[in-house]
Image (tube, coloured by chain):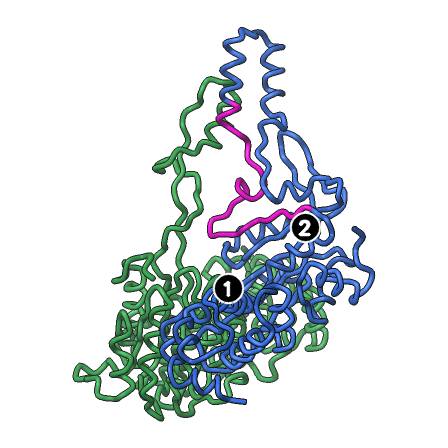
Amino acid sequence: MDLPRSVEDTGRLLAAGRYVADESLSTAVFLALRLGRPLLLEGEAGVGKTEVAKVLAETLGRRLIRLQCYEGLDAATALYEWNYPRQMLEIRLAELGGEAGAEGRARLARDIFDERFLLKRPLLLALEPDAAGPPVLLVDELDRTDEPFEAFLLEVLSDFQVTIPEIGTVRAPAPPIVMLTSNRTREIHDALKRRCLYHWIGYPDAARELEILRLRAPAVAAALAEQVVRFVQRLRAADLFKLPGVAETLDWANALLALDRVALDAATVDATLGVLLKYQDDIDKTAGAPVVAMLAAP
Amino acid sequence: MTPPSAAPAVASKLAENVVHFTRLLRAAGLRLGPASALDALAAAAAVDVLRRGELYWALHVVLVKRPEDFDLFDQAFRLFWRDPLGAAAATAALAQLLPSLRLPRPARLSRRLAEAWHPPRPRGGTAPGERTDRAAAGAALSFSADEVLRTRDFEQMSAEELARARRIVARLAVAPRPVATRRFAPDPHGERIDLARTARDSRKTLGDLAPLRFRSRLRRPPPLVVLCDVSGSMGRYSEMLLHFLHALIAGRERVHAFLFATRLTPVTRLLRRRDPDEALARCGRQVIDWAGGTRLRACLREFNRAWSRRVLGHGAVVLLVTDGLDRDPDPGLAAEADRLHRSCRRLVWLNPLLRWSGFSPRAQGVRALLPHVDEHRPVHNLDSLEALGRALAAPGHRPPHGR
């Protein structure tokens, strides 16, 4: 599918993938596609950062290549690695086959650095040509990795080419669509930020959250969905250590559905608060009277 | 090293001045050894000293090793050699050299330079010779004087002693004990086989296995987060601790600093300025509640809510510098301290009041904090700062991957 031609187009495209984007996000995605720049999405956990890339890949019909970051991620896991055990096996087999002489050795040396022995990791895969068009490369939770990897990533993202000494340079025919996400558990280095377009995904307002609920949890009755959204929105205004994200709202709505509830009452909320709040302090602070007050408020 | 012999009197005068100039820069804090003076002499001898621009750049090239010293050198040169290039020209030249590093020109002389130029003690003439004698005498005395300084309370130091203490503080190395990361590095004594390198090496022998290569886990210090109280009751301590903070931050990744009194102010970026005077001046402009009262609970709360998840990742060590005297004692303080404690690898409370042997935790704030810190240490003189460095480098009380 072709890239969207305007901000509205982008919004419609995301909506087709059941993603409710506000105008600022649509603009950010549109510009990232139009300018061919990586898009860095930051925001609290559970606001739908990763989902943007997934939906984009799905609606554009592109391949999604995901690189989940973690501490200690290195080039061998992110880019490529030679399959050493297979190479060694190949060498032994060649010896057994009795292929001797300078010519045999030279062929062997050429053969064992063939692509067959190359284990391609996400970054290299993203540079390869794809019939459907450049893939969507999702570098997820970038803040979990460390600064050396960031520097390495910066290098790949600026040239979209990688040199493998034994094979040569792999260059992307067209740069992939790159999405990076960060939960902001540490600051991403300025140099990398400078390469990217930046967008902060905040919590949605009531109308948008209701729309998300309608699209993503269609089985939940409209009246209950409205109550759920109103309660969660009030909860976000409260003084909590960790506010519930959209993912929690969806989980909660589905949990209420599983419990066969059609309306919120204080006892149900208290019993299911653990779906929304993940810190004991927060639950202690909210359960009981505050829940009653939040439910009662007009 | 002999200056040109055409005019011996002029040349020896020049040599003397170059040496004085080097001393001035050293007194102002540039890292210059005796070799630098020799280099400076050689450089001055090699250029046409009558053209002052040449002298400026000749000395610049041998004496300035770090971009952050550009400004100081420029000021010192104009002061010492009576404005050879003209302020405007010097600024323009500097700007051209390093456009990205150009700082807003400080209106006044840097305090370090001012002190180096006008030592606070009373003195008669300004003859260069006298200045030299005094500088030399000062250097000879400094060792024993430093010994006395180590145990003296910051609060009781004279301005001159403070200045010297600041220089010692700037050299203190404080880094938390390195912890194992998930990354590996080649290591001949490592405990794991590095298959990739072994296989790569065996390419040379085509199949015959080369000697095994090994690797081991890379270790690096965890992030360090400092929360420093700058309220009125901290007095002189906060100034000295700021210098300490500056030394901590300069040139290190993964150190974050916050100042607080009535509100919390992040100052990491401000303290990254390499020149301590500039860095502190910037902090001073940014922190508006300087030397006000303390709202300990509110500030910890703000840190917990807005910052803890951003800077306490990767197992950070937190230094909380405060006297624990809260202006409006609040029952919520213990809960906030508890939250902070549980979000980090190790929480160290540095308390200048702990210097009194008779210190007992009577204040409400102190009592609320104490159960939630891993360590409660004094921080009132140079010795205690040094002890802090040692304590951080030692294994902590909590398991390395706790919480």
Residue B58 seen anywhere in this rendered image of the structure: no
Instruction: Chain B: give its colour.
Output: green
Closest to the observer, B198 or B304? B304
Asked whether A69 falls inside the magenta stretch, the response is yes
Q: Please, what is the three-letter code of the amino acid marked with disc 1?
A: Arg
Residue A37 picture quarter: bottom right
Badge 1, how many Cα within 10 Å: few under 14, some, many 20+?
A: many
Instruction: Report x, y in % for residue B125.
Output: 48, 85
Task: Answer with mark 2 or mark 1, whichever residue precedes in sequence.
Answer: 2
- Residue shown at the point (44%, 42%) measured from the top left: B185
Secondary element type, mark 2: strand
Whether B366 is drawn above or below B248: the answer is: below
Image quarter where the C terminus of chain B lies is: bottom left
Closest to the observer, A35 or B210? A35
Q: Nearer the viewer, mark 2 or mark 1?
A: 2
Kindly report the distance in space between the C-alpha atoms of the residues bearing marks 2 and 1: 25 Å
Closest to the observer, A283 or B365? A283
- Residue shown at the point (58%, 38%) measured from the top left: A80
Which residue does the numbered mark 1 point to in the structure image?
Answer: A186
Residue stretch rendered in magenta on the structure? A63-87
Q: Is residue A202 left or right of residue B24?
A: right
- Residue shown at the point (54%, 51%) measured from the top left: A68
Asked whether A138 falls inside the magenta stretch, the response is no
Instruction: Chain A: give its colour.
Output: blue
Which residue does the numbered mark 2 point to in the structure image?
Answer: A136
Q: Residue furthest left?
A: B358
Badge 2, how many Cα within 10 Å: few under 14, some, many 20+?
A: many
Check the residue under mark 2 and report the chain it is in: A
Q: Please, what is the three-letter code of the amino acid marked with disc 2?
A: Val
